[in-house]
Image (cartoon, rainbow, N blue to C red):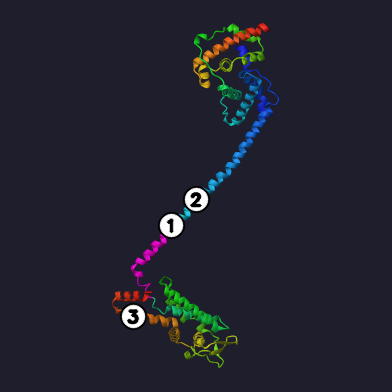
Amino acid sequence: MSDNWQNRIFNHEETPPNNAWENIAKQLDAMEEKKSSVIQTEVPSVVEQKKSKIIYWRMAAAACITAIIATTIIWMNIDNKNAPGNTHVAKVPVSTEPKVDNQIANINANNKATESVATVSKKEIFTNNKKTIDQTDSNEKLEYAKTDVVKSLATNPALNKKEKLVGTGGDVINDISLMNSPNSYVSFIGPNGQEVKVSSKFSNLVGYMDGKDPEAEENLDKIVSESNFWRGKFKKWRNKMINTNIAPSPSNFLDIVELSKLLNEQ
Amino acid sequence: MQETLYSRFAPKMYAVCLRYCGSTDDAQDLLQDGFVKVFNNLEKYRGDGSFEGWIRRIFVNTSIEHFRRKVKLATVSEAQENTIEDKEWNALDSIAEKDIIKIVQQLSPGYRQVFNMYVIEGYSHKEISEILGISEGTSKSQLARAKVILKKMIETNLLQQ
């Protein structure tokens, strides 16, 4: 068999029709358009899938974190309740310390006020009393004034003020009996010479601020004794103690605990 | 770049298409399909052989796919093989390429496929049998029949000249 004609046939070239390339180009363009449209329709779905995956993982992570935090809080609460040292601490609300808070608030209010001191202080007392009620209603919310707070009260810089608030007669009014006198007002001359008219209830407080009255405890007792809230509270406790069989003695710790429980009963 | 490639290889590949097809219309379709395949698979060319060889292989495979369903190859006994002597093949040397292609185009699709692959492209019967999905014996018998028919055609062609 001759290779001559085979090689000629193998390498033979024939001019293709003129429109052949145009047809090929059209087909290629059509395929390109089809590809791009497929990509355009597929890409958003891929992005959406990724987004949904990310959202799913974020939700899962958030759920895990929430569960961990909730578990931790529950464990800590259980531990706190089971701790032997904490048992009677939460059950001794019989304290005059909230009253001290009232006093601090009142004194601060009086320090700041130049006019309408009575109104402001009344509001303060009311809100503080309300706070105290809320606090005693819920053992968890109880906050007690610390010793250092009381101490700082005793060493309040207001006590050592050089310019004193004095009555129009020149003396600081320091009559406790005036405290509850209804519809009576006391006029003071302020440090800048201005005249200030306040309820007589706050006369001794002003005196206390001026350092003329060393009997702070007396003032506190007075306010406490006049507090309807504490009066009711003491009455309640008194009735409870009367109607119970427990006779606590200072040497018996369990009796004290029982008494504390009794007083905390709602 | 695509148009450059086309203008560089289209004449040779169109000749291949003509050999494998019975008509110019089929050859044009084949040319179009072949080049589309080439352009879509350019990144698969690894540079192992010649680029022209790679393109030619694509065109041969495309032509095979194109006619696979049409062609039903019948097994012929091996006794019919190599019935054409070399001197008869040598007669083709004096015939122009276009005329040879025309003669080949007159073969039935099955004969044409095997003849082109074995005689022109240089595939072995084993390779042809694997590519076309036939037995080696079938490939040989198809070639033998093709040769017989071609002999007659060449004689006729020479007589006409």
Count numbered badges in the picture: 3
SS for callout 1: helix
Q: Are marks 3 and 2 on the same chain?
A: yes
Q: Chain of mark 3?
A: A
Callout in the foreground (3, 1): 3
Q: Main secondary structure of the magenta part?
A: helix
Instruction: Please report whichever mark, 3 or 1, sits nearer to the chain's N-terminal start.
Output: 1
Nearer the observer, A176 or B82 = B82
User: Mark 3 and mark 2: span between their CA atoms?
Assistant: 59 Å
Return the residue at label 2. A56
Return the residue at label 1. A67
Q: Position of residue A65 (x, y in %)?
A: 45, 56
Judge from the rendering whether residue A210 lies leftward or rightward of residue B161; answer left or right: left
Query: Can you tell which mark lies on residue A88?
Result: none
Q: Position of residue B101 (x, y in %)?
A: 64, 15
Return the residue at label 3. A241
The answer to whether any part of residue B141 appears in the image is yes
Q: Are marks 3 and 1 on the same chain?
A: yes
Do the residues under discs 2 and 1 have CB atoms within 8 angstroms?
A: no
Q: Chain of mark 2?
A: A
Nearer the observer, A209 or A255 = A255
Q: Is residue A211 above or below residue A86?
A: below
Q: Position of residue A93 (x, y in %)?
A: 39, 76
Asked which quadrant contains residue A32, the reply is top right
Q: Give the residue displayed 33% in from the left and 80% down from the top.
A: A241
Check the picture and name the quadrant holding the C terminus of chain A. bottom left
Instruction: Please report whichever mark, 3 or 2, sits nearer to the chain's N-terminal start.
Output: 2
User: In this picture, which residue range is highlighted in magenta?
Assistant: A64-92
